[in-house]
Image: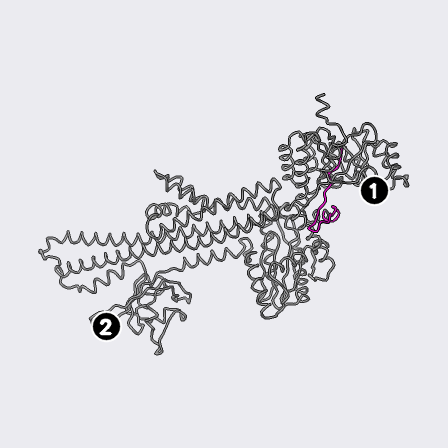
Amino acid sequence: MVRDDGGKGLPARVAAIILFAALGALLTATVLEIQAGATAYIVGESHWSKAQQTAVSALYRYAAHGDPADLARVRQALRVPLGDRAGREALDRRPIDIPAARRGFLEGGNAPADIDRLIRMYRLFARAPYFRESVRLWKQAEVDILHLQALADDIERRRRAGRIGAAEIRHHQRTLLAMDARLRVAELAFSQSLVDGARFLRGALTALAVLAFFALAAYALAVMRHTLRRIRRTETEFRAAFHQAAVGMLKLDREGRITQANEVLAQILARPLEELRRGHLQDLLHAEDLHVDADGRPDWARMLEPGERRLRRSDGSSRWVRWSASVITGGDREGERIFAVVEDVSEARELASEIAHQASHDDLTGLINRREIERRLGQITLAVQRQPARHALCFVDLDQLKLVNDTCGHAAGDRFLRQFAHALASQLRGEDWVGRLGGDEFAIFLAHATLEDAERVAQRIHARLAQSAFHWNDRKFGLGCSIGVVEINPDTSDADWLLRAADTACYLAKEEGRNRIRCYRETDEAFARRQTELDWVAHIQLAIAEDRLLLYAQRIKPLRGEERLQYEVLVRMIDHEGRIHGPGYFLPPLERYGQAMMLDRHVLASTLELISRDTRHLLSLDLCHVNVSAQSIADPLFRQFAAEQLDRHPGVANKLCFEITETAVIGNLTDACLFIEAMRTRGCRIALDDFGSGLSSFAYLKSLDVDILKIDGAFIRDLGRDNVDLALVRSMAQVGRALGKRTIAEWVENEAAMVRLAEVGIDYAQGYAIHAPMPLAGLIREWKATRPDPIGAMSG
């Protein structure tokens, strides 16, 4: 009760009113700041979640394929959660390191405008209810992030050492999937705890604000009653709270007629305030969100439930709001009224929708991404199995993307991809869709289409693309592509098989000359052959993981002078039934599908490990020959791997000779020279294998620093019957002597050939006439058993 003091206390009462108003404004601003802070953390969590998913996805691919670009994506993505971790740890220090916290949150991809807000929220509420749980979940998720980083380091080390096999890859991939599942749960829990915390604090502060408003109104009414005696208390109280609120408010009668609305609500709905006051609830609420009873009046039992609803704006669009309503019971003539508070949450929903869209769409082209493609195909295959139907999937590979990137830059390549994606999408029907699998690969789903229908659609796409071109500056590129087509029917097992089958068809289309169409049919011999080759690749990968690759060796004999131990290391595979397979079965598929370096790494590491263990053998050894494929020569990572292996086994380099084929050298002269230089610098020797099979052998010898020429066996096989071969071998021997290089003849099958080779000046011979290939360990034991101990001879 305000004492009537004749107006002497009016300034103090006015000051009290101002203080109450300031307190209400402060509470309102605090509510908005907390909401903004929670939103900033939710947005930050979306960056965190997206980065974590990118890191898991890229590390999953890196574990399978070893692509350095995937590892780089892992490292880049991990910078986001690790940056957030650094920011949080800076705030946990005593004293707090604000600059370090800012740097960490910026590294975490948070908007610069939100950094101070994130810091304030953490400092004020890190130990508050709900927010304390958010921090705990955050720290808990960081354990998996650090584990993810350590796993990336481990996989990288193992890949560099060539010690990762298919079983380990699958183990790491399962670990990644389990880790991703845990992190997703933690991310959802983190977001929910933030929302709950913000709601809790907002509710508490809103309650305080309402109390402040009521206290202000009560005090003002008392002042007005004792000073002016004309303003009615209830009306003043309601108007003060109603019109100063930072959220939309409206007052309705039981019939749903609007009796009052505030300016914020008018702004949300883009309607004049007077129009709102003459309206009805059904004019504002979306029909799906308006609950009515049997008489057509609002069903307040359901309408009073809080939740999110849509309000219709004057232009016909909708705005999502958080709706909260309650019944106000009064003793006046108006009776019961409904008081509703609405908070615009459209932007938050749009943000959530955008995050969901980004998770399922490719940023560059706007098409659905691989994850969404696989999800949709999984649903389609299940639907087809439940209710038989026929659809088709096209696997599309853009032919000239690498050329555009290499000649015009990646900006041109990106535009090239966007134009190509638009061209594909423009050719589809209503139920069809197209997505980007990654890189230059796309997937097209054709609804209700047989294999023949799909082939006709693919032909139409080819014809349309043939009429188009990509222009960049003064250059012009065609939009050619290879297309593999597979039918989706009740026999289709799953999305994984579907993509593999379409990929196989596309691969064959590229092999047959590119810019063509290939339909997958299981009866086609080409598909069966490719499947057999892929099986061999899988067998070798598994054999390496299970240590079922055998090192064999074949002696190389000097044709003049003292006999010394020299051999070429060969490789065999033993299957699960105990059968031994020569390289003719598995080496061509490995080279065909770019997996030869995997075998080269294993053979080199195993050979060095074996020969370096026996000092006596190493002293007796003149030279050990190891073959290196063209793929390994062209890859700097293999060059680095070979150097690391030689460093790990000191004293072996001068006993090692790398054999590289002449055709590989001619096709990769620059890379071959880099490899030769790196290995010779470490003391190794280089042999040019299959010498004479190239088109420009003698000319290339001038620029190649090799030690040995291994003459192609095709010239040796008929040496006793073909004088032309003999003349060619004689000329090769003369070239070798003139250049100071030793010569080795391969495929020596009889004594007569050995005699002729010695006559024409060949230095060494290799073949079944000299030695049949045998296990390398057995050759080492056999040589040691028939030769004196060189260590003992030196000490004697």
Label 1 to label 2, Cα distance in Å?
108 Å
Residue 479, percent from left and from top:
65, 55
Give the position of the N terminus as an image quadrant.
Answer: bottom left
The residue singled out by tag 2 in the image is 335
The residue singled out by tag 1 in the image is 714
Query: What residue is shown at x 63% (from left), y 48% (from top)?
Result: 404
Residue 26, percent from left and from top:
27, 52
Give the image quarter of residue 249: bottom left
The residue sitting at the left extreme is: 6
Could you tell me the amino acid type at mark 2?
A: Gly
Q: Is residue 126 visible?
A: yes
- The mark lying in front, picked from 1 and 2, is 1
Of label 1 and label 2, which has the lower sequence position?
2
The vertical placement of 20 against 299, above or below, is above
As helix, strand or loop, the secondary structure at mark 1 comes to helix
Residue 76, percent from left and from top:
51, 44
The vertical placement of 571 against 300, above or below, is above
* Label 1 crowd (10 A; few <14 / some 14-19 / many >=20): some
Query: What residue is shown at x 20% (from left), y 71% (from top)?
Result: 332
- Magenta stretch, residue numbers: 566-586
- Magenta includes 567? yes
Could you tell me the amino acid type at mark 1?
A: Ala
